[in-house]
Image (cartoon, rainbow, N blue to C red):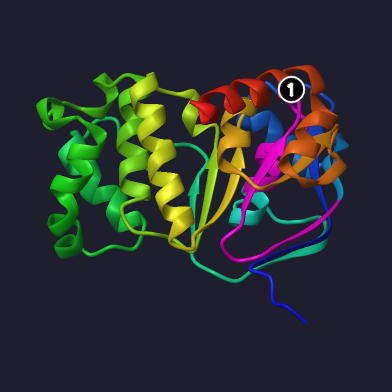
Amino acid sequence: MEEYIIEVNDLTVRFNLASQRVDNVKEYFIKLMRHELMFQEFLPLKHISFNVRRGEAWAFIGDNGCGKSTLLKTISGILKPYRGNIEVRGRVAPLIELGAGFDDDLTARENIFLNGTVLGHSRKFMKEHFDEIVEFADIRNFLDSPIKNYSSGMRARLGFSIATMVKPEILIVDEVLAVGDYKFREKCKVRMQEMLSGGTTLLFVSHSLKDVLELCDHAVYIKKGEVQMVGDTVEVCRQYNPEQTEEILQEMRKINSK
């Protein structure tokens, strides 16, 4: 039997949503001690199953709120399954919230070393790769400015540069290409394609079907927390949005024929 790098089996995730308003911490703990807190069960993901082989690129598509980001966070270990299980066999680099490990009051220079430590890299290692990170992020002139003064695009460039400095076995990307300018998005796509060529497995969420069709060979279409289709990227995109998919495919054929 072939071993998969990621196995998702009958995954269900549950959130408890407060069904009443609690205005402050004191009131919360009083209600908690009296067993008066009321919650409503919400299942953002229900009975999700799929298997990923090493080196494959998988896209997760669907409307806002369908559960795509929740799925990636569960695979990353940020959230725990309510039912079912996930097996991940490889080192994961999750790009779910770029810059989430930054300290706004520190400079970019300081944050590079801080973020590297969070990712498990030594200070020596970060020094060796410092120039590479800065050049890719294109922030040389702003190295000693506090991160809080950075635009969302600049934070994204820096976060992506740090996280992809070392080729992970599994790269998880959630809407990274939605931030930043065209030049940055193209640099990100080139780097991800290079990583895929080197054997990295990609899990990718994007509302851009063009990016999905260019980068991924498999896709999962999710609607209201449930899988609608799993399979070849083109066929899954056609199921999700047939008109837009055909427009993109025609455009890609024109470019390839030149």
Secondary element under disc 1, as helix, strand or loop, is helix
Give the image location of residue 172, x and y in percent.
Answer: 54, 49
Q: Is residue 112 left or right of residue 32?
A: left
As for residue 70 lying within the magenta part, the answer is: yes
Instruction: Please state which of residues 230 and 38 is positioned toward the viewer in this rendering.
Output: 230
Q: In which quarter of the image is residue 127?
A: bottom left
Compared with residue 167, is residue 141 higher up or lower down, i.e. above or below?
A: above
Can residue 29 be seen here? The reply is no
Give the image location of residue 217, x and y in percent.
Answer: 65, 48
Can residue 94 be seen here? The reply is yes
Compared with residue 104, is residue 84 higher up or lower down, i.e. above or below?
A: below
Q: In which quarter of the image is residue 191?
A: top left
Q: Which residue is drawn at 31% across and 47% down?
A: 162
Q: In which quarter of the image is the N terminus?
A: bottom right
Boundaries of the magenta span: 48-72
Q: Which residue is drawn at 35% across and 34% down?
A: 187
Q: Is residue 5 left or right of residue 32?
A: left
Give the image location of residue 3, x and y in percent.
Answer: 69, 77
Instruction: Please state which of residues 173 and 142 is positioned toward the viewer in this rendering.
Output: 173
Q: Residue at x 29, y 30 (%)?
A: 104
As for residue 24 lying within the magenta part, the answer is: no
Residue at the spot of label 1? 246
Instruction: Please state which of residues 64 and 24 is positioned toward the viewer in this rendering.
Output: 64
Q: How crowded is mark 1: few (under 14 residues within 10 Å), some or many (20 or more)?
A: some
Q: What residue type is labelled 1?
A: Glu
